[in-house]
Image (spheres, grey):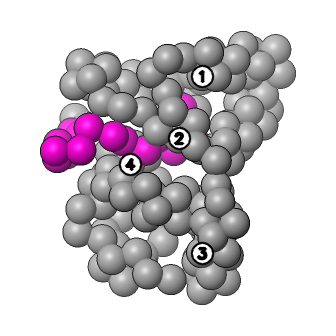
Amino acid sequence: MIVIYMMNDKRIFVDTGAYLARFHTADQRYQQAYQAWEQVQNQRRVVVTSHHVIDELATLLARRTDYGFSARKIGQIYASQLVLIERSSATDEQTALAFFQKYADQKVSFTDCISFAMMMRLQIQQVFTFVIIFRWRGLKCFRRLTSYNELRMNP
């Protein structure tokens, strides 16, 4: 069972893996993703993602399914009135680079680093993700929808 941790802020940042698992029926987390997306919709969450996540998703989904399918799904995200696609700032990218360098030994993707930098700037405390492969000071890694309420995300 996946649980979304509710807080006063109804925004939730959606990571690549959450979209990938939802769209790709052969994904091992498809069923979990489907149920979690229902929770997100039922709780009327404000879905926030980044153009970096969309970029990563388009490529991964195309390689695991086909490019036409991926293009249709990406088009649906862009057309959705329920998804806010944020762009990173130069400051976000510099913060992400600091994370990327500091945690290079843990092979954290640059997209994940950008996502965390953006979440800090936007003060988004929750993320829908399945795998977080690194631990920063105070970071607890979960294999479910994750709350960042207790995180200290300083590079």
Separation of marks 3 and 4 at Cα, in angstroms: 18 Å
Q: Residue furthest right?
A: 67
Highlighted magenta segment, given as a residue range: 3-19
Q: Is residue 18 visible?
A: no
Residue 104, numbered circle: none
Q: Earlier in the sequence, mark 2 or mark 3?
A: 2
Disc 4 to disc 1, how far (Cα)? 17 Å
> Dot 1, how many residues are within 10 Å of its Cα: few (below 14), some (14-19), or many (20+)?
some
| Nearer to us: label 3 or label 4 | 3
Amino acid type, residue under disc 3 in the picture: Thr
User: Residue sitting at 52 percent across and 58 percent down?
Assistant: 118
First reached walking from the N terminus: tag 1 or tag 3: 1
Give how far across and how far down residue 27 sits, in percent: 55, 30
Task: Find disc 2 in the rendering and name its residue.
Answer: 49
In primary-sequence order, the first of circles 3 and 4 is 3
- Across and down, in percent, residue 62 comes to 78, 28
Asked if the residues shown at circle 1 and circle 2 are in contact, with their CB atoms under 8 angstroms apart, the answer is: yes
Classify 10 Å Cα crowding around label 3: few (below 14), some (14-19), many (20 and above). some
| Residue identified by numbered label 1 | 77
Circle 2: residue type: Thr
Residue beneath the point at 83% across and 21% down: 67
Q: Which residue is mark 3?
A: 95
Q: Secondary structure at mark 4?
A: strand
In terms of secondary structure, where does tag 1 sit?
A: helix
Pick the quarter of the image with the N terminus: top left
Is label 3 in a helix, a strand or a loop?
A: helix
Q: Earlier in the sequence, mark 1 or mark 2?
A: 2
Q: Residue at x 36, y 64 (%)?
A: 141
Q: Mark 1 and mark 2: span between their CA atoms? A: 10 Å
- Which residue was labeled with disc 4? 127
